[in-house]
Amino acid sequence: MGGLLSMQAIISTNEHERIAALGRYDILDTSPEEGFDQLTSLAALICGTPMAVMSLIDTDRQWFKAKVGITAAEIDRNHSICSQTILQNDLLVVPDAQADPRFKDFPLVKSGPSIRFYAGVPLLSSDGYALGTLCVLGKEKRDLTSTQAEALRALSRQISRLLEFRRTKNDLIRQVESQKEIEQALRESEEFKTRLIETSHDCIKVLDLDGRLLSINAGGMEALEICDFAPFKNSEWIDFWKAEGRDAAIAAINMAKDGNTGRFVGFCPTMGGKPMWWDVAVQPIRNSSGEIDRLLAVSREVTERVQAENRLRAIVEGTAQATGRDFFTSMVKHLANALPVKIAFATECANVEKTRARIIAFWDGKGFMEDQEYDVKNTTCERVYEGETCFYSTELQKLFPLEEALVSLNGQSLCRIPIKARQAN
């Protein structure tokens, strides 16, 4: 494949692939290893040389993995006889490098350690790339015997096998470490999901296909005021639901068993008797074969929403048939019952200047009171007439001491909402 010009190494046509192959062994700049040291020492002993090197040829350097009789850790590739050796597939012998025009000007030949004799064999990878060399060196002109030459070839093959073993071992170690990292990540992911489920304020339950309770998360137990799950394990989940919620729970289970999602809103009080409504979704849980073997029931509390809907329904139903002045009397009564509050009333502007207000409907929890008219100034009506919604949660009488009606009723809190006519007044 051509010769070697002094001071500049010839590069093979597959150099890019060779360097890539060398990188896969992950061996450059690693610490000494006993196996390589022993084989290199054996090469020097068999060949009767004071120096021997097992080296790897990098892009611009020759790095010594194992060495005998040499202190340097690496040399410039352009000054390396081994750069010539990797261009061939067999032993290269240079009896007298100081007389060889290819190598006589190399620093290791021209000066210390003043090499004359060189014999090297390429170290081949499993896919045929020359990664480096095993070479022996001496300060005297000489040659190898056929036995020494064959032994050097055998040692190079042994080093190549050791390189393959080392690579395979390291690959396995990396795979094991990678698998451990994956397993650790999965454990952490599972632990996170478990914590997420356990601390959720939703009730997350797992049921068998007959609707029996298998597990419930900690947040769900807290919401339902369950201190010990043991008495509830394997109990009928539908027994938690009251009234029409029981039939809805049965229907949701059947839908999930068919592979769909069952939804309903039902009433399920806590173990302490606290009334609570829940928005429930029941879904199938499939095993690794895709078969449904359990059910997941997730319940989210919607008590306030349901109560608000019930209040609104009560108000709408209570005022649906009322018109004119009767509308307001019906509205304040049903509004007081739905919220629930003790008193509800409606007022209107008593004059164009909006300086007077008239109570047109007043419900005190027992009955209706007669209409009253009063000055707006320094009362809770003043800001409402300007279009503002006003809410006073405490100390109402201290804020409006001149509003005699509130003082006489001992009112402590108040919410007033403006009602605009079609003319937006």
Image: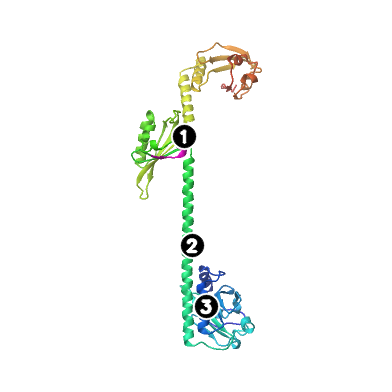
| Nearer the observer, 168 or 348 | 168
Disc 1 residue type (three-letter):
Ala
Residue 158, percent across and down?
Answer: 46, 76
Mark 2: amino acid: Arg
Query: Mark 2 or mark 1, which is nearer the start of the sequence?
Result: 2
Label count reads 3
* Residue beneath the point at 50% across and 79% down: 42
Q: Quadrant of the C terminus?
A: top right
> Which residue in the protein does label 3 denote?
40
Cα–Cα gap, marks 3 and 1: 74 Å
Residue picked out by circle 1: 223
- The answer to whether residue 86 is seen in the rendering is no
The residue segment tinted magenta is 214-221
First in sequence: mark 2 or mark 3? Answer: 3
Residue 411 location, quadrant:
top right
Q: Which residue is mark 2?
A: 174
Q: Amino acid at mark 3?
A: Thr
Vertical position of residue 416 compared to residue 366: above or below = below
SS at mark 3 in the image: helix
